[in-house]
Image (cartoon, rainbow, N blue to C red):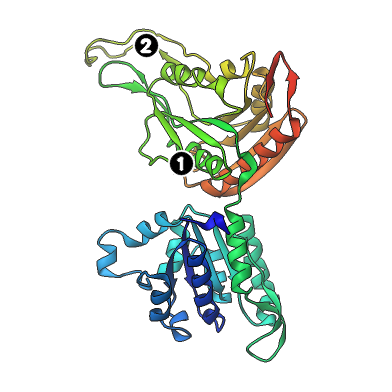
Amino acid sequence: MNRLINKRILLGVTGSIAAYKSAELVRLLREAGAEVQVVMTAGAARFVTALTFQALSGRAVRDSLLDPAAEAAMGHIELARWADAVLVAPCSADFLARLAQGRADDLLATLCLATEAPIAVAPAMNRVMWGNAATGDNVARLRARGVAILGPAEGGQACGETGPGRMLEPTDLAGHLDAMFDRGDLAGLRLLVTAGPTREPLDPVRYLSNRSSGKMGFAVARAAAEAGAAVTLVSGPVGLATPPGVERIDVETTEQMYDAVLARAGQCEIFIGVAAVADYRPRQVAPGKLKRRDASLELQLERTPDVLAAVASLPERPFTVGFAAETGNLLDYARGKLQAKGLDMIAANNVGAGLGFDREDNALEVLWPDGAASLERAAKPQLARRLISLIAARYHAKGTTQGSGSAYRA
């Protein structure tokens, strides 16, 4: 289980008799080289003590959402960002339901809502509770959001009955957690991603831009790094932290992004253009601040360089993936852009009021010359992981291909 070395695992323990097994799970994860932070619910504390987990993990157990000392530094957000993965084991029927509802009424539920790390749950409950339709609906909802459901196993239960509902054994859970980091679909490949908006100056204090936050592009860069790629991220001006293991290049204008991308595109196998680049820029930039004098002001605009088309037309081009943000006729415009620019794939999403920009979630329609896939609405980190898996599958399926006067390497 060498993939767990130096990984930061947030282990949630909820109210189930299986909580005693979580102590062994902490020991196994620590032996595998992981750091483990245990978060207990009030129900878990009725079955096993925090002192046990503290002794095994070497870290004080967290159990209170409104801990004055921790919350002085927004402790629940800090923990959510700290984790490389979240595992809830055991996961009671009650916590499964609260997680599906998006509740934030205790520390563990809030962490699950606030984290961008992958989440897994190991259900543990009576066989009838597991078989209840409400539980089935909750599990289906969580799976659709990208939450990994580990188990349950079948066998004897604490209530004396036999059937499905047992928490998987600690060794099995540790193995599943180790496998979560085996995201090697892009191992050994170099990947170039653009993200965020660009800004085109009008004068020294004003510019033309758009509402892109960069969150989707940064999530794609992180997911690609998790999948084993060496990732370079060319970003417009955004207020986001660089994803772990990603090389970042900051630019401001479309021309700067064009130059940064074209200087590197020939050295990568995959290019994903997520950035919402400006299509036009002022023909002239005023040397001083424009004053409000006349009743109206005319601006002459000119086209900016087309970053995506330039990459797609390279003689030895990378596998090229574009993005299309549209306010209507989504599939028609996306298919037209895919064909006009000779792309390998395009990911399209609706934008406008309550859609796309300024949101933590998104949904994508992904098209390629002979196929399509719909990625349902999910938090952008989870959506990015699904997109990267789809891109990796298409890349490997095509292999070394000649077409449209260009080639890429598999």
The answer to whether residue 104 is seen in the rendering is: no
**111 relative to 231, above or below:** below
Dot 2 corresponds to which residue? 299
Q: Residue at x 47, y 80 (%)?
A: 44
Q: How many marks?
A: 2
Identified by mark 2, the residue type is Leu
Q: Tell me the crowding category of disc 1: few under 14, some 14 to 19, or many 20 or more residues within 10 angstroms, Cα based.
A: some
- Left or right: 255 in relation to 72: right
Give the x, y percent position of residue 37: 42, 66
Q: CA distance from mark 1 to mark 2?
A: 42 Å
Which one is nearer the viewer's eye here, 31 or 275? 31
The C terminus - image quarter: top right
Which one is nearer the viewer's eye here, 166 or 236? 166
Dot 1 corresponds to which residue? 245
The N terminus - image quarter: bottom right
Give the x, y percent position of residue 228: 57, 42
Q: Residue at x 56, y 38 (%)?
A: 229
Q: Quadrant of residue 139?
A: bottom right
